[in-house]
Amino acid sequence: MSDIDLVIFDCDGVLVDTERIAVRVDVRVLAELGWTMTEAEVVERFMGRSDAHFVSEVEAHLGRPLPGDWETPYQSWYRRAFEAELTPVDGIVEALDAITLPTCVASSGTHERIRFTLGLTGLYPRFDGRIFSVQDVVNGKPAPDLFLHAAKSMGVEPARCIVVEDSRYGVAAARAAGMRALGYAGGLTPRAWLEGPDTIVFDDMRQLPGLLA
């Protein structure tokens, strides 16, 4: 990894342990909207994708558009759950303390959500000024746009970047961007979904500094 100049972190499931909480709430929200789905189905269909993708899939399933304020009643469900339960991903604080390479965040979440979740867990100051959201690009993951935008903004060639991801769509986006990937399988995503070219799969965030060495 001596030719790596930038580590690009996904946020949800990599820095903050939101996925377990959000998927549980997603199931409730989808049921309210009229689409019964298991947690495993939510992980496979939506984890790592943007809010816009979520909306488009729901609208296609229901056969009708959602109103512009459809999510207003549900925002408090996520907020209360995060405020009560959210923690950093196990081992990530120790990993960040040991990593000496430049870092940034590139997430499928909105800037507001990234600030909120990183702020709740005390991680926001570690990445302030180096946070990139799907709101900054036209196409979200698995398209490479977000990671390419992050690399360009940080002044680093894509081939000299490595992405830390926990979703199949994020790993696919890294490969499409011409970047290597470290697939974190310590969360909800099955290891097999992350395996593939230019990718190392690992289970414990405490291994991350060694993988980057």
Image (cartoon, rainbow, N blue to C red):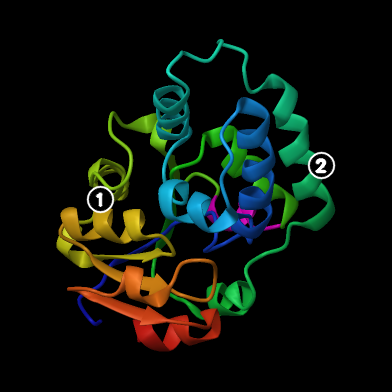
Q: Where residue 188 sits: x, y (%)?
A: 53, 66
Give above or below for 152 relative to 19: above
Vertical side of 137 occupied by 166: above or below: below
Location of residue 31 with respect to 70 vertically, above or below: below
Q: Is residue 8 magenta?
A: no
Residue 74 in the figure: left or right of residue 43: right
Residue drawn at the location 27% of the way across and 51% of the way down: 151
Residue 137 located left or right of residue 123: left
Q: Position of residue 122 (x, y in %)?
A: 71, 57
Task: Provide residue 211's location: percent of width, then percent of height.
Answer: 37, 85
Quadrant hosting residue 104: bottom left
**Disc 1/disc 2 C-alpha distance (Å):** 38 Å
Q: Residue furthest right?
A: 84
Label 2: few (<14), some (14–19) or many (≥20) C-alpha neighbours in 10 Å: few
Is the C-beta separation of discs 1 and 2 under 8 Å? Answer: no
Q: Which secondary structure dominates the residues rendered in magenta? A: helix
Q: Nearer the viewer, residue 170 or 105?
A: 170
Q: Nearer the viewer, residue 157 or 178?
A: 178
The amino acid at mark 2 is: Arg
Q: Residues within 10 Å of mark 1 (few under 14, many from 20)?
A: few
Question: Pointer 2: what residue?
Answer: 80
Determine whether the residue tagged by mark 2 lies in a helix, strand or loop.
helix
Give the labeled residue for mark 1: 155
